[in-house]
Image (tube, rainbow, N blue to C red):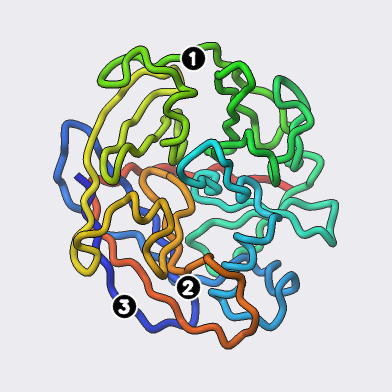
C-alpha cells in the first residue's frame, strides 16, 4: 500500500517528488520521501525569461516542447518522465535536445538532436513526433512507448536516431481480473510505463501492473492520507488536486508541486504547495550517462 500526505512549504524554488511503490506481496515497509527543491533546466531561463521557478516549470510542461508532454487522448495519465528525466527542445536551437534530472537544480544536460531526435525513424510509427503524436503514450528509461494501429504496442530507443526496439504482437491481457480483455479496451486507464512495466489505474485507487508482454504482475491499492485524506490517486492523476501535477511513473508516481491548469502571465504568480510523501520500499537504480 502506498501512503501519501500533504504539507505546506514556503519556497523560492519548486518541489518535485519521486517516490517508489514496492507492491510485492502487499508490503507495508515505510521509507523516506524523495523530495527535491529545485529550479528547472538552466536553458528555460532564456526560453522563459523573467519567470519564477514555478512559472518556468509550468511554462516548460505546457509549452509543447517536452517529449511526451503532449498527453495522449488514449490514456488516463500523462507520462512525460523518461526514467527521472524530462527531455525537451528549444525551437531556437535545432542542433540540441535538452534533458534534465528531476533532482538536480538548474540542470545543464544536452545531447545532439541527430542522436536524440524528436521524430522516429523506423517501424510502425516512423515519422511520428515525440512532441505531438497522440500515439505516444509514455516515456521510459531511454525509451518511448507507442500504441499502434493494430492494437499493439511498440517501443523505441530514445537515442539511436529514434529507432524501433520492439514491435509487440499481443493484444489481450493475461492473468487476473483482466485476463482475456484487450489492451484497446483498457488503454484509457493507462497511467505510466517504466522498467518494462505497464501501470493502469482502475477507479480511484486500484493499480494494475503488467509486464510488456501483457502478463499481470500485481494488483494493489494506493491510499492518500494526512491533509489529502479523502482524496485519491485518481484525483491526482486526473488533475483534481490544486497545487499538484502528475508527471508520470518512475518506480512510483512523479509529482510536481505546481498547478498547470493555466499558463502564468507574469512573474508575480504565487508560491505553490508541496507534497510530503511517505512510501513503501524504494527500488534503487543508476541512471545512464548520456554523451554529447
Kindly identify which numbered label has been placed on residue 171. Answer: 1
Horizontal side of 84 relative to 174 (left or right) equals right
Classify residue 292 as left or right of residue 177.
right
Q: Nearer the observer, disc 3 or disc 2?
A: 3
Label 3: state its secondary structure.
loop
In the image, residue 244 sits, relative to residue 134, either above or below, namely below
Decide: few, some or many residues near mark 2? Use Cα within 10 Å; few <14, some 14-19, many ≥20. Answer: many
Closer to the eye: label 3 or 1: 1
- The quadrant in which the N terminus is found is top left
Residue at image coords 24%, 46%: 222
Q: Is residue 57 above or below residue 26?
A: below
Mark 1 or 2, which is nearer the eye?
1
Mark 1 crowd level (few <14, some 14–19, many ≥20, 10 Å Cα): some
Q: Mark number for residue 235?
A: none
Residue 270 position in % (x across, y down)? 49, 84
Q: Is residue 181 visible?
A: yes
Task: State which tag comes first along the sequence, 3 or 1.
Answer: 3
Amino acid at each position: 500500500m502506498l501512503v501519501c500526505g500533504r504539507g505546506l512549504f514556503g519556497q523560492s524554488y519548486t518541489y518535485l517528488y519521486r517516490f517508489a511503490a514496492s507492491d510485492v506481496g502487499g508490503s507495508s515497509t515505510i521509507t523516506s520521501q524523495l523530495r527535491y527543491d529545485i529550479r528547472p533546466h538552466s536553458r528555460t531561463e532564456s526560453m522563459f525569461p523573467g519567470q519564477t521557478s514555478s512559472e518556468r516549470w509550468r511554462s516548460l510542461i505546457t509549452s509543447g516542447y517536452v517529449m511526451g508532454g503532449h498527453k495522449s487522448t488514449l490514456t488516463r495519465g500523462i507520462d512525460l518522465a523518461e526514467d527521472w528525466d524530462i527531455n525537451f527542445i528549444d525551437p531556437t536551437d535545432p542542433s540540441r535536445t535538452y534533458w534534465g534530472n528531476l533532482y538536480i537544480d538548474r540542470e545543464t544536460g544536452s545531447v545532439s538532436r541527430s542522436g536524440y531526435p524528436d521524430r522516429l525513424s523506423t517501424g510502425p510509427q516512423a515519422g511520428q513526433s515525440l512532441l505531438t503524436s497522440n500515439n505516444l503514450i509514455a516515456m521510459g528509461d531511454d525509451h518511448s512507448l507507442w500504441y499502434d494501429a493494430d492494437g499493439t504496442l511498440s517501443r523505441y530507443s530514445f537515442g539511436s536516431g529514434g529507432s524501433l526496439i520492439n514491435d509487440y504482437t499481443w493484444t489481450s491481457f493475461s492473468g487476473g481480473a483482466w485476463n482475456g480483455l484487450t489492451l484497446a479496451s483498457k488503454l484509457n486507464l493507462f497511467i505510466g510505463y517504466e522498467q518494462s512495466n505497464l501501470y493502469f489505474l482502475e477507479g480511484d485507487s486500484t493499480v494494475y501492473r503488467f509486464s510488456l508482454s501483457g502478463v499481470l504482475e500485481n494488483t494493489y491499492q494506493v491510499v492518500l492520507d494526512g491533509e489529502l485524506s479523502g482524496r485519491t490517486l485518481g484525483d491526482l492523476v486526473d488533475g483534481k488536486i490544486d497545487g499538484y501535477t502528475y508527471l508520470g511513473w518512475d518506480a512510483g508516481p512523479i509529482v510536481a508541486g505546481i498547478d498547470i491548469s493555466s499558463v502564468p502571465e507574469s512573474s508575480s504568480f504565487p508560491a505553490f504547495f508541496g507534497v510530503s510523501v511517505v512510501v513503501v520500499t524504494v527500488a534503487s537504480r543508476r541512471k545512464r550517462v548520456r554523451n554529447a
